[in-house]
Amino acid sequence: MQTTLYSPTQLADILHRFNVRPSVQRMAVLGHVADKRTHPTADEIFSSIANNFPSLSRATVYNSLHTLVDSGILRELEIESGVTRYDLALQPSHGHFMCRHCGKIYDISVTQDLLRAMSDKYRVESIDVYIKGICPECTEN
Amino acid sequence: MQTTLYSPTQLADILHRFNVRPSVQRMAVLGHVADKRTHPTADEIFSSIANNFPSLSRATVYNSLHTLVDSGILRELEIESGVTRYDLALQPSHGHFMCRHCGKIYDISVTQDLLRAMSDKYRVESIDVYIKGICPECTEN
DNA sequence: AACATAATTAGAATGATACAAAGTTAGTAT
DNA sequence: ATACTAACTTTGTATCATTCTAATTATGTT
């Protein structure tokens, strides 16, 4: 059941490379996001790994996730209102497709052509493009 | 102070066209989103129009917004974690640029070329492409 | 081993949004 | 006009994700 694509050593390596201390909790959080590729929420992660950590706190999951995002290992997805989902950031950038019916989230590549071609497979109902950064006004000041 | 780009008659017309009953509250909510183009949150809308409606309830603002979104007049933006923002949907589809520093949200067009050209004006730090619809698995069933 | 720093825990607090029941309004038919 | 009905608004309460705080524990370094 527990497909382990990333060994503990590999997880520790990743954390080291990004200058994040490899606590067991952090490894478990990262491991879950990296192994299952379901773009889980903080709560899903908590429920899944709580078995192995009787005293695990939600705050720890949130703390770990924030640390992992800040370090660049994970990336936040806000594809669904009200919850933040998490995705491995260690791979070529990609868009996401969420099925309105089953809720599953698929990784997709996002070149113009592919986006158009996608309509054959997926029934696209909405596309959101969000860009963040620094605006001209703020760059001057 | 209160720039009125849309007259009450125009607002009522829009609501009629989309088969939404033009209650005063709904007109006020739509009017605020349509006039100011600040992509406001439910709470910002509530605060702004509460002056004119001493007994206005937050629930009414949420109800109105849901009705307006369902009818296709407004569109939800999830560009910022934890809050939903609202935008007029009655215009050519466009992306959004949020400044990490001042928080302002700019409308931008999203063709490949323009996205590339944008880097001259805006300092792009992250791009999110979210697509929703029905996946192949669900289409079969 | 002792100290300093960082991480974890538990529980309470916050804040956006949803819900439920009662009251009000508006549209329609008599 | 009056009464009926359905839609809308209100009020207060509930929920749920996330954050905060203070106390505890673990880790790394001298």
Image: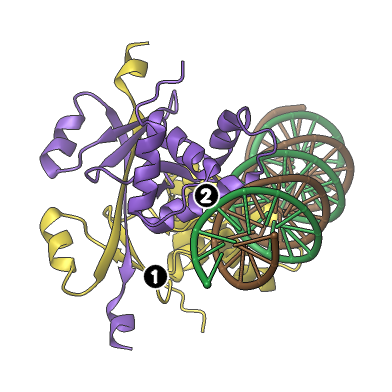
Chain colours: A purple, B yellow, C brown, D green
- Could you say which is closer to the camera, residue A110 or residue D12? A110
The image quadrant that residue B28 belongs to is bottom right
User: Is residue B94 visible from the viewing direction of this image?
Assistant: yes
The image quadrant that residue A8 belongs to is top left
Query: Residue at position x 16%, y 73% from top?
Result: B120
Residues marked 2 and 1, same chain: no
Q: Is residue D22 left or right of residue A30?
A: right
Where the C terminus of chain A falls, by quadrant?
Answer: bottom left
- Could you say which is closer to the camera, residue A14 or residue A132? A14
- Could you say which is closer to the camera, residue A55 or residue B17? A55
- The residue sitting at the bottom extreme is A141
Q: What amino acid does circle 1 point to? A: Arg
Q: Position of residue D26 (x, y in %)?
A: 62, 48
User: Is residue A74 visible from the viewing direction of this image?
Assistant: no
**Residue at image mark 2:** A64
Query: Residue at position x 32%, y 73% from top?
Result: A134
User: Given contact means CB atoms under 8 Å apart, are the residues at marks 2 and 1 in contact?
Assistant: no
Q: Is residue C20 above or below residue A75?
A: above
> In front: mark 2 or mark 1?
2
Mark number displayed over residue B120:
none
Q: Chain of mark 1?
A: B
Q: Residues within 10 Å of mark 2 (few under 14, many from 20)?
A: many
Q: Position of residue B59 (x, y in %)?
A: 69, 52
Q: Is residue D29 above or below residue A58?
A: below
**Residue at image mark 1:** B100
Distance, label 2 to label 1, CA atoms, is: 23 Å
Q: Is residue A104 left or right of residue A119?
A: right
Q: What amino acid does circle 2 point to? A: Ser
Q: Is residue A72 left or right of residue B34?
A: left
